[in-house]
Every structure is written in C-alpha cells, then in structure tokens.
Amino acid sequence: MAQRGQQVPIQRHAVTPPDRQQQPRHGDRQRSGPLWVPEVGGPIDPANEAHELIMSKFGGISKGERNRIKLRVRTSMAALAQVEGRYLGGRPPYGYRLVDAGPHPNPAKAADGKRLRRLEPDPLTGPMVQRIFAEFLGGKGLLAIAEGLTRDGILCPSAYDRARNRHRSGIAWSKAAVRAILLNPRYTGRQVWNRQRKDEVLIDVNDGALGHMTKLRWNDSESWIWSQQPSHDALVEDETFARVQALLAAPRRVQEGRKPRRTPRPYVFRGLLFCGICERRMQGRWNNGKPHYRCVFPREYAQVNHIDHPRSVYVREELILKPLDKSLATIFDPVRLPDAVRAMSDAQLADDHRLAELETVRRAVAECERKLTSYRALVDAGSDPAVVAGWIAEMEAKRKVEQMRLDRVMGKIPKRLTEGEVAEIVATIGDMRKALRNAGSKDKAEVYGELGLRLTYEPARNAVIAQAELGRSCTKVCPRAEHHRSHMAHRHLQPHTPHPGQLTDWNHVPDGN
C-alpha cells in the first residue's frame, strides 16, 4: 500500500497504435466503379436530382421491407414461445443444461441436420439455484449468499461454463450473479421470451453521419411472452418465485439526515485503474478530502481462489498522477516524437498469436491446391476420369472450407499501419504536455481515455504498471473509414532493447514533492 506522501513509481510498456481495419471477408466485393442501377439506365450520378430521388425511394422501400420482415419474425417467435414453449436459443440459465428434443419440425432445417433443444435441470448446479432461493427467503442478503457459495467452493456461473463466459473472470460469486438468478422467471418451468430488446441509437447525437449502434435494453415485465404450459422441469415453485420478486421489489430504507452531494466527485482514473492481485477494477473512494482508489476483496474469495489478497487495498490518486503526467509528457515531447512514432509502428503485431494460426491455415489451403493439381495431372495422364472426378470434388469442398477459414482469420488480424498513419493518430491527440499541464480533473480523464490508458497497481511492489493503446476507449467501430484506424485490440509488448520513443520498463521516478 502506498504510504502517505510517497509517490508510486510507474512502469511503462509499449504504446501500440490502434487499428480495426480488417481484410475483406469471404464474399465481400471491392467496388472500384460507381453503383450501376438498371432503373436509371446506368451508374448513379450523385449530382443528379432525379437519381437522388430514385435512390431515396428505393431506400424507403428497403426500410419498409426490413421492418415487415422484423415484424413477421418476432411474431413467429412469440407464437412459438407462447404456444409451444419452444427453446429459441441463447445460453441456458445457470442450473439448466441443453439436451436434444428431436428433429426440427421444419423439413428443410431437418434435412440440414438441425434439431430442437430443450432445457433440463443440471444435477450439479440445479440444487444451487434452489439453495439461493431458499437462503434469500430465509433472510440472507445477496452478498451473504454470494460469499457463502464462494466459501463452499461452488463455481460461479462464469466459472462453471467457461466456453460461454470467456470474457468474464469467473473468480467468485457476485451479488449481480445472485440477483440475476433470483430475477429469472424460467426457473418456474415456463419459457419466457422478449425480456430484452435491441434498440438502435445514434453513436453521436451531434453527428448523425456516424450512424447507429445497437444496445440491449430490458423490457417491462408486461411485455414478456410466457409459455401457456410448462416447457421444462421447474427448479422453484411459482409461489416461491412470486415471494422472492415481492422482496426484491420492496423499497429500501432511506438513510435519514444524509446530505446530498452538491457536485459529483471527480476521479481521474475512473475505470482505468486495476488491482494487480485480483485484476478487478479499483473503486473510487473519497478520504480525508482527497480521491483514493480501493479494492475490497472478501476473505472467502481469497481463500477459495488461493489468492493472498488483503481485505482492502488503497492508493491515493495524486501519488500516481504526477509521475504519470511527467512520463507521458516525456514520451510525447516534440523532439522525441518521431522516434516514438517509429517505435509504435515497429511494435505492431509483434506478439499476435493469430499469426501462427494464419500460417497454419495458409499451408492447409496450399496443400489442397497441390493435391488438386496432382489429381488433374492424373486425368491428363490417362487415369479413369470418373474416379478422379470424385477425388477432385472432395478436395474442392475441403479447399473451400479452408479458404473460408483463411478469410475469417485474416479478417480478425488488423492491418499494419505505416509511420505516417501512426503520426496522424498521434497528431489528433495534440500537444500532450500542454494538455496535461492546463487540464483539470475532467479534462485529464478524457485525455487518458483517448490514450486507452490501463493502470495496474501492485501493492507488494508499491508500483503501477501503465499500458496505453490509442483509441481503446471507443468500444464501437466508427462507420467512417478515416475513423477505423483509431481502434485496435490491446497487445502487451515488452521490447528487448529500449527505444528512445518507446515505453519501456521504468523503475525510477523523481520525487515530485
């Protein structure tokens, strides 16, 4: 833990320039010429008002057809869930597993090998769901239930089903997981659909040209579609579920005499600082009139996961802020900026594990093409064409599958940027030294977000590891082509030879007091 008045040393790692531009996927076409529309007798001319009117008309017709298809599909799914109680996809709730329910009733899908599935109680996790409901009705709170399950060595949902929850840590039970189970109506044995919906919202309300993004939102319980009859074995009774919902919906007691905060307290590293022991985000906490960050880790979590984690880990914000600003100002100094840009360009894809997969798939495609060439040579040499034709057809199918794999892997690997493109990205950030020197807490937080900063506090070493990735703060790929460069998955790079413009290990921080 950082002592009072002692600055926290910063260790730096490579800044990786972002990019989310992908290679063309399988089936994509690159159009080099204008769009040809038969109705206008040739290519579309954007400057022609008649052409613009026709395209607007086509756009309205396409949007209307899209909405009609959407309505038909949703109406059909609602009927299947309500009348037949059919399982319509998605991950099974904790406490259930998926089992085969026979051939698909649609002949075309049945011929394609698709089959229906249904929910069945999991013998391992089903009793845990019943335990959660019983303990909650017995008076235990959400945190007490979560700590008890963790203490008893019960795997949380994300740890029990890692294949569907690779994006979650799975370290222990949380209050959110317990609450989600208590709110899930499918434990009553009925199929419930339309609990969530997808809304399209503007990426930027001030710039409609950026397009829309899709967000999942919860529907009111009145909009849920319930199956008329039970579709799977229930884990809790209807009466038990209703009692739990009443308790969850009961208003909480409001603490009297507490004055509301006049202004929200600023935390510069909100969402950017992580605990180096458990890898969770540290929470902001105001203490003695100054912003701190803490990680509170229950004793039960540490014991079950074999982690030597203190009950609380604290670090003061200002002990990180000064050396971090000084480090960033040094890196983005105009004199050293060309070297930094060159280092960032050279660091791209240095440790991308997908490169090995790409090479493997390329070899598979090349092997298929080699065999096809040899089969055709057999036909030319006088072999039976009927026999060789079967081999060629089989190998063509295999080559097509491998080619699709190759296109898919190439689509996941970002394109390497030139030094000029990296310099353009850095230029959009502006004068880093001036921005950090004159910025307030809110503005600094925005600058750190644009850098894609991630800080990891290691209390045992009293050090902070700083990693930066330009543009990581934006979670969506911007529709505009010129914005695509500002997105890229994070890569942890450790160069063997320090470069003047590259973030490397740094163990000495001058005292800023």
Image: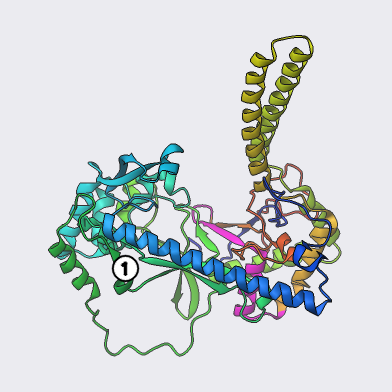
Residue 350: percent from the left, percent from the top? 71, 43
The reply to whether residue 294 is in sight is: no
Q: Secondary structure at mark 1?
A: loop
Q: Residue at x 74, y 13 (%)?
A: 378
Quadrant of the rendering where the C terminus is positioned: bottom right
Q: Nearer the viewer, residue 490 or 355?
A: 355
Q: Which residue is mark 1?
A: 224
Q: Nearer the viewer, residue 176 or 445?
A: 176
Q: Quadrant of residue 360?
A: top right
Q: Is residue 206 left or right of residue 274?
A: right
The reply to whether residue 41 is in sight is: yes
Residue 177: percent from the left, percent from the top? 33, 58
Q: Nearer the viewer, residue 405 or 33?
A: 33
**Magenta-highlighted residues:** 438-461
Q: How many marks?
A: 1
Residue 235: percent from the left, percent from the top? 19, 52
Is residue 460 covered in magenta?
yes
Task: Relative to 311, say whether 112 is above or below.
Answer: above
Residue placed furthest toward the top: 382
Which amino acid, mark 1?
A: Trp
Residue 51: percent from the left, percent from the top? 78, 74
Task: Relative to 152, say whether 64 is above or below.
Answer: below
Mark 1 nearby-residue class (10 Å; few <14, some 14–19, many ≥20): some
Q: Quadrant of residue 254?
A: bottom left
Q: Is residue 472 left or right of residue 373?
A: left
Q: Residue at x 61, y 80 (%)?
A: 205
Is residue 353 covered in magenta?
no
